[in-house]
Image (tube, grey):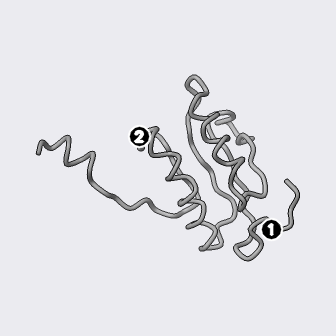
Amino acid sequence: MTSDEEQSDAIFEVPIDGVLDLHTFHPQDVKLLIPEYLLQCQSRDILTVRIIHGKGTGALRERVHAILRKLPQIREFYLAPDGSSWGATIVELFENHDCGEGDSK
């Protein structure tokens, strides 16, 4: 096994601090990564999360938003209002016990 293969197969822990920078992940990992990361944040009462997807062509941003639209624990999400504008999305989560149940989104 080459060192490149070992690195791609390596499992590493992502700090659960409310900021998820997708630049360090493969695009195919995003579909599983985002829901799990948000659940971990929610379980730690981190209810505002910043997902950094970069500006680029907007394809990753659209993919992130498509994933977020399907998750019941999302109160709302929007492009970051600061200088990063459309390079990051802010996600507001329901409290862990709320999880959006009964909410008509």
Where in the figure is residue 6, as x and y percent of width and height? 19, 48
Q: Nearer the viewer, mark 2 or mark 1?
A: 1
Residue at left 55%, top 67%?
Answer: 40
Q: Is residue 56 left or right of residue 83?
A: left
Density class for disc 1 (Cα within 10 Å; few <14, some 14-19, many ≥20) is: few
* Label number found at residue 18: none
As drawn, 57 above or below 8: above
Gap in Å between the C-alphas at discs 2 and 1? 32 Å
Where in the figure is residue 69, as x and y percent of width and height? 72, 47
Secondary structure beneath label 1: loop
Q: Is residue 77 left or right of residue 16?
A: right
As drawn, 10 above or below 73: above
Residue at left 38%, top 62%?
Answer: 13
Q: Provide the residue designation for mark 1.
A: 101
Density class for disc 2 (Cα within 10 Å; few <14, some 14-19, many ≥20) is: few
Residue at left 54%, top 63%?
Answer: 17
Q: Residue furthest top?
A: 57
Q: Quadrant of residue 100?
A: bottom right
Looking at the image, which is closer to me, 53 or 30? 30
Name the amino acid type tagged 2: His
Q: Provide the residue designation for mark 2.
A: 26
Where in the figure is residue 41, as x and y percent of width and height? 59, 66
Name the amino acid type tagged 1: Glu
Lower sequence index among marks 2 and 1: 2
Q: Residue furthest bottom?
A: 97
Q: Quadrant of residue 53?
A: top right
Where in the figure is residue 72, as x and y percent of width and height? 72, 59
Secondary structure beneath label 2: loop
In contact (CB < 8 Å): disc 2 and disc 1: no
As drawn, 58 above or below 30: above
Q: Quadrant of residue 79?
A: top right
